[in-house]
Image: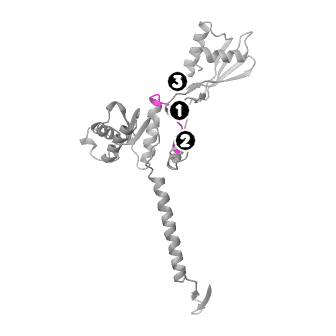
């Protein structure tokens, strides 16, 4: 590129390269090809029409009636154990409506469209100005935890959704806030079951500590099960101490003639440690 100063250096004239008609045609073809690649690649990613095999179905209640009708047809096509309808407060007409949230409205609409009422669960979400789907997902996650459904890590759920969109294999297992050791060999992608046991550690030859507990227990109920096993003569313990604060720590001392390994086997066999 050449430059020339004129008018006492106040203006500058530049000579630049511009494409010829051949170059213009080539650039146009490149832009058109790029646009086609974007369109062809975006549609399969954003408009997946191949539902993943699952036991439950989650629906946002604010969707239109024809989408809810499609939900009914999907439930007729595949057997679901539950349909969860989420949604925040109605944006208009709530004082005149018997339904106060999109979750309740969507659930009632599904019933009117022929879906069995016992299959449907309305899960209201809090009012938000943005990230409506995210707020609904968090509300459903909390609802499942409160109703003794197997909880999952929310980030892992999002990663699984991305894998589904990309048609990639994924594995999503339950994630319990109380920790524990999980056997998920019979989980079968949610169709089977899991076994969770407490995490026991041998601090030394005569001391066993419990640092994580199964999700259906508390430290109080677990200690009560140990004391019950002791009264029945199924478990011999020298001392039992609970040092739980922010983290679980239950210390059990072995009696004379019993090793830490033997005590751990007995805890799994006769108490709520498993």
Residue highlighted by disc 1: 188
Comparing labels 3 and 1, the label whose residue is closer to the camera: 1
- The answer to whether residue 196 shows anywhere in this view is yes
Give the mark nearer the N terminus: 2 vs 3.
2
Residue highlighted by disc 3: 216
Give the mark nearer the N terminus: 1 vs 2.
2
Residue highlighted by disc 2: 156
Task: Provide the residue span drawn in magenta.
Answer: 145-158
Q: Secondary structure at mark 1?
A: helix
Residue 206, image quadrant: top right
Question: For the point 49% across and 66% down, which residue is it?
Answer: 35
Q: Residue 82 vs residue 33: left or right? A: left
Q: Nearer the viewer, residue 232 or 48?
A: 48
Q: In the rendered image, which quarter contains the N terminus?
A: bottom right
Q: Residue 59 vs residue 2: left or right? A: left
Estimate the spatial distance between the alpha carbons at disc 2 and disc 3, rounded to whole Å. 22 Å
Around disc 1, counting alpha carbons within 10 Å, would you say few (fewer than 14), some (14 to 19), or many (20 or more)? few
Around disc 3, counting alpha carbons within 10 Å, would you say few (fewer than 14), some (14 to 19), or many (20 or more)? few
Q: Nearer the viewer, residue 67 or 3?
A: 67
Q: Is residue 147 magenta?
A: yes
Q: Position of residue 16 (x, y in %)?
A: 58, 84
């Amino acid at each position: 590129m050449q430059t020339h100063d004129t008018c006492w250096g106040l203006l500058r004239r530049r000579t630049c390269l511009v494409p010829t008609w051949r170059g213009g045609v080539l650039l146009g073809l490149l832009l058109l090809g790029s646009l086609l690649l974007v369109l062809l690649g975006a549609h399969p990613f954003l408009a997946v029409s191949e539902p993943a095999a699952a036991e439950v179905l989650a629906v946002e209640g604010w969707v239109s009636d024809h989408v809810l009708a499609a939900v009914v047809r999907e439930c007729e096509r595949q057997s679901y154990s539950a349909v969860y309808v989420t949604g925040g407060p109605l944006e208009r007409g709530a004082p005149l409506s018997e339904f106060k949230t999109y979750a309740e409205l969507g659930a009632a609409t599904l019933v009117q469209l022929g879906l069995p009422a016992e299959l449907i669960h309305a899960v209201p979400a809090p009012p938000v100005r943005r990230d409506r789907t995210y707020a609904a997902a968090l509300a459903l996650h909390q609802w499942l935890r409160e109703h003794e459904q197997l909880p999952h890590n929310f980030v892992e759920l999002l990663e699984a959704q991305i894998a589904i969109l990309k048609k990639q294999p994924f594995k999503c297992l339950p994630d319990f806030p109380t920790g524990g050791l999980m056997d998920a060999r019979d989980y079968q992608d949610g169709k089977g079951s899991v076994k969770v046991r407490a995490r026991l550690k041998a601090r030394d030859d005569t001391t066993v500590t419990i640092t994580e507990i199964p999700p259906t227990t508390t430290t109080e109920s677990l200690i009560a099960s140990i004391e019950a096993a002791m009264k029945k003569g199924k478990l011999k313990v020298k001392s039992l101490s609970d040092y739980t604060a922010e983290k679980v720590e239950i210390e059990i001392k072995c009696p004379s003639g019993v090793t830490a390994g033997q005590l751990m086997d007995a805890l799994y066999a006769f108490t709520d440690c498993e």
